[in-house]
Amino acid sequence: MKEATMTLPGTWLAKGRRKLSASLPLQTLLLLFMLLAMFGPLLNLLIWTVAESWFFPHALPSQWGLKYWYQVFSPYSDVSGSLLTSVFIAVLSVAVCLLISVPAGYALSRRGMPLRVLFMLLFLIPQAFPNLTVYMNIARLFYQWGLNGTVAGVVLVHSVHGLMYSVWICVAAFSAVDPLLARASRNLGAGPVYTFWHIVLPQASPGIIAASIFVFLESLDEFTGTFFVGAPDITTLPLLLYNASMSGNYQVSSITALILLVPSLLFMLVIHKFMRPEMLSKLGKG
Amino acid sequence: MRPSLKYLLLVAPAALMIAVLFLYPLGFSLIAAFTNDARQLTFAHFSKVYALYSSDILFTLVIVLVSVALLAVISITLSAVITLSPCRPIVRMLGFLYRLPLFIPFIVAAQMMRTFLAKNGLMNNALVATDLFTPLETVSWLGWKGIIITFVWKQLAFATLLICGAMAALEQSQILAARNLGASRPRILFDIILPQVLPAIGVALVLSTVTMMSVLSVPLMIGVGTPTMMTVDMAFRVNSYGDYAVANALGVVSLLICGALSWFYLRHSLQQKGGE
């Protein structure tokens, strides 16, 4: 029914096409603008990754080559080291987030949960305040606790940042689970723990996997928190990108940027299929 | 054990984590901004902020307001075209294009813009190639213009996604009815669609403001010295002087700016609800 109404505008608008002939050039212009605006910076990044020398006023690099790629992917470069650190931190953050948000998501999806709205709002708070102020005070606290410049400190900061997404996605995943199946399992004599592991969790797993990917990406891309808590002892990819860019090494910073860019774009393309804007509209009304 | 208690225990770790690692530092920053070393109430940090950073605060405010205004215009235009255009290929391509930056981190966007908008960047080179400029006339777009462009470029995906979603969720029969009664497309947009998606636009813009106020990498990489954005000042204060008091006072000012914008939005939307 919903889909039927969605396709309607296409048919009625098709009838009025004659009237629209004037605005079609404008729309094409908008499309062209978006094409240039979106792909221009991407193209510039790609060119820099294969430019060996590029000076003003040359419009294109005077020397092309993969020299910097070899340099970046040599086993002794900073990049492979930071890539490992980044992935390690991201995996740990995902583990921490899941460990905390799966039980929380399950509890918040139950009807018996007291103060449900209050808790849901609590997990929204990190999105509602500028978090730089918080990060620098976390850094100060971590300094007292001896967590500054450690992997554990960075993982904690990334987990707090990712927790909001993982809790909300887990709540949605557990809310979509069919309660009758769990009841049937209990009626057949299975214990509550067995039922959770074998009946409820498998049904919620797509959502939990989505939450994990999201937390992983957020951790991989996080800059501000790592800048305050991890630097200079922990160098993740974004910090390496920043340092390389500020010291004028655009080739290394562009290659690092590309390494960070590819998973982000892939994730966008994957959920492009699943994520319809209509689903998000409820957010705006909330 | 009562089930409600069990549920509370399950939520406790997550709630505790937010409380210890977010609410506590936030409260800490508020207290640090208003007290001196002897833990007495003082406004000295704010007078220092005013003396040293008033132009930066103004700069930040202008950047954020201009970015939000541009963001509103472009994302509403895009959403309107996607919702109302009869030309399916254009709609499909726009729908794909605007989402591209959705998960691209700010630091990557900053790096791309740092090269793209530079004096020797691809944008200037393209303009020279079309004979609009000579190479000597080109100017670097880095600085405040670059910061605004980067913010709008990155936040466009998020804002358009929210606004477009709200438009798609509207009752289609209203638009059909207006169409049947002879309303033009701009009129449908301004009189029927926009009033109803105003809450979504507000949420998108307020959340974008909060994001822009907390991004450090973009002003660091795109900005050119002074004046700069408050986030850079805060990081500088902490990293160079270990001066948490003034940094936290700056943090309170940025909270106030976000708070003022949210309050403006809330008051506006409440007024509308009261009027209905």
Image (cartoon, grey):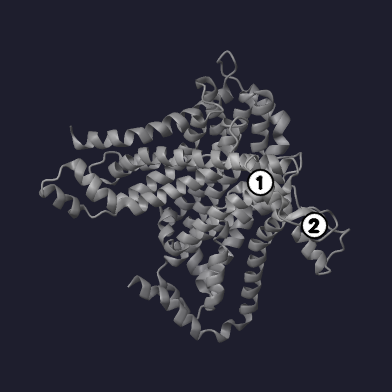
The chain letter under disc 1 is: A
Q: Which residue is mark 1?
A: A72
| Picture quadrant where residue A33 is located | bottom right
The chain letter under disc 2 is: A
Q: Are marks 1 and 2 on the same chain?
A: yes
In depth, the one of A159 and B59 nearer the eye is: A159
Question: As drawn, which residue projects farthest toward the left?
Answer: A188
Question: Percent from the top left, x then y, of residue A39?
Answer: 65, 63
Residue A63 is tagged as 2
- Residue B148 visible within the image: no
In depth, the one of B48 and B212 nearer the eye is: B212
Sequence-wise, which precedes: disc 1 or disc 2? 2
Helix, strand or loop at mark 2: strand
| Picture quadrant where residue A78 is located | top right
**Local crowd at mark 2 within 10 Å, few (<14), some, or many (≥20)?**
few
Q: Quadrant of the N terminus of chain B?
A: top left
In the displayed structure, A42 sits above or below B131; it is above
| CA distance separating discs 1 and 2 | 18 Å
Q: Quadrant of the C terminus of chain B?
A: bottom left
Helix, strand or loop at mark 1: helix
Q: Is residue A1 left or right of residue A214?
A: left
In the displayed structure, A87 sits above or below B103; it is above
Q: Amino acid at mark 2?
A: Gln
